[in-house]
Image (spheres, rainbow, N blue to C red):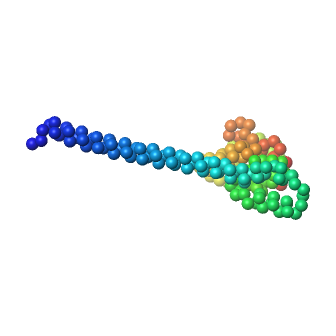
Amino acid sequence: MPSVVGLLEQHELAARRRVDGLREEADRIQAELAAAEHEWQEWVIARGRVDVVLAPDGGNTADTETAPDRDADAQSAPRDAAKPKSQVPMWRERLAWSVLSVDYQRILTVLADRSRLGQGPLTCQEMAAAFGMDVVPARVEALRSKAKRLVARGWLAEQQPGRFTLAAGVAGPGGGS
């Protein structure tokens, strides 16, 4: 029959091995976490650079002020057309609504109609109802996300929390002024 002290030593040794194994695993996870964070930061930097390149003015407003010739017109049109419509460009005067996806255009259209009729801002629940959508949290939050993105990019204004209207200067669907 083993002694009590012997049994305690066996349990202590097993516990020590478990602690050492967990420490090694924790060190491995910490190293993996550090590598993943570094990779993530590199992707954030890359996305920022791509955003600058895909910006409506290409990150440089000087090149859009060139003399109007056929080559300049041919270069500027494909640049706007090549952007994925899921991205919302910063609003600027005379920027056509067609650069936006259909979902964003619908939001602007309903708010432009309300503005034209002298009606006030809309909530996302009211927008969902106006679009004939089910007024459920998932749909409302999706609209809120799009509306907030339009506010951040200068297309909409949110003068009261959760109530959206066209931003000053943004007008009918033909253009932004």
> Which residue is at 55% across, 50% downward?
39
| Observer able to see residue 78 | yes
Label tally: 0
> Which residue is at 86% across, 52% downward?
65
Decide: is 83 above or below 23. Answer: below
Decide: is 89 above or below 163. Answer: below
- Place of residue 76 in the rendered image (x, y in percent of width and height, measured from the top left): 81, 58
- Place of residue 44 in the rendered image (x, y in percent of width and height, measured from the top left): 61, 48
> Which residue is at 85% across, 63% downward?
71
Foreground of the two, 172 or 76: 76
| Observer able to see residue 106 | no
> Which residue is at 20% across, 42% downward?
10
Q: From the image, which quarter does the N terminus lie in? A: top left
Residue farthest left in this picture: 1
Left or right relative to 65: residue 151: left
- Place of residue 108 in the rendered image (x, y in percent of width and height, measured from the top left): 76, 50
